[in-house]
Image: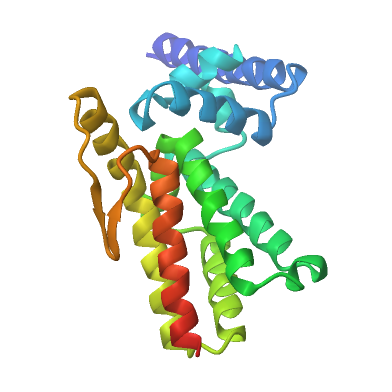
Amino acid sequence: MEYVHCKYTVYIWGCQLAIIRYMKAAVRKGLTKAKILEEARVLVDTGDARALTMRALAARLSVAPMALYNHFHDRDAILDAMADSVFQSLRAQTAEASTAARRRSPWQKRLKIVVMSTQQLATRHPEIFRIAMTRPNKPASAFMLAAEITGMLEEVGLSHGQALTVYHAFVILLQGYPFWREGLEQHERSGGTEQVCAPYGLLPAKWTAERQFEAVVDWLLGCVAEMAG
């Protein structure tokens, strides 16, 4: 009995030593949160969220899966950090649009910069954008972004309720854009040439998805201008 207990103890010690060696190897490789997130984005960009597993990520980084837990509790923590990085990037765009130099531009132009920057991010990294918009627990940066944009709208005369309505209208538009784009691409592949209906009329059939999106954004901004008086 003592012999079995001794073997079990040695086994546990061996496992602990192996984990420590893996951790030290990860440190030697310069493993950081930023590096893990960078490789996680590549995995998601080249596949989808299902491609992101701790084993797949560890393989890309040439470390043991256990080494990742030194920086993130689990896979969900990595997805949450990825979402946070998206909103932080968009906040930077909002801050740029709100600088003293930009404030000399019409508010419509400043808000359009933010919306179009978000659309471009959704186009370049559709799966990462989808993850950011659908995480069950939104990071603090998401709420800060919403507060900054609604604040920009309130500055031009909208009430807080109106500003929230406009903000959500743009969010819905941005979330639906990838499906709109995919539909247009399928439409073109099938040889369709008819014009596309928009809230204020027909959009030219030769316009790209990006140009059509921009036209709808301009129309929405016009509606906001009317609300602001």
Q: Which residue is at the front of the view, 129 or 114?
A: 114
Q: Position of residue 99 (x, y in %)?
A: 77, 67
Residue at far right of view: 101
Would residue 24 appear left or right of 163 to someone viewing this image? Answer: right
- The quadrant holding residue 153 is bottom right
**From what the image shows, is residue 188 above or below residue 102?**
above
**From what the image shows, is residue 146 above or below residue 215?**
below
Look at the image and tell me in which quarter the N terminus lies. top left
Answer whether residue 93 is visible to the viewer in this image: yes
Residue located 52% across and 42% down the image = 121
Q: Position of residue 208 (x, y in %)?
A: 40, 38
**Tally of marks:** 0
Residue located 71% across and 69% down the image = 105
Q: Which residue is at the front of the view, 143 or 160?
A: 160
**From what the image shows, is residue 157 above or below residue 42?**
below
Would residue 53 appear left or right of 83 to someone viewing this image? Answer: left
Q: Position of residue 129 (x, y in %)?
A: 45, 43
- Asked which colour scheme the image uses, the reply is rainbow
Would residue 200 appear left or right of 157 to someone viewing this image? Answer: left
Q: Which residue is at the front of the view, 209 or 27?
A: 209
Would residue 133 appear left or right of 107 to someone viewing this image? Answer: left
Residue located 66% across and 15% down the image = 21
- The quadrant holding residue 216 is bottom left
- The quadrant holding residue 138 is bottom left
Q: Which residue is at the front of the view, 198 or 63?
A: 198
Answer whether residue 135 is visible to the viewer in this image: no
Q: Position of residue 44 (x, y in %)?
A: 44, 28
Residue located 63% across and 73% down the image = 107
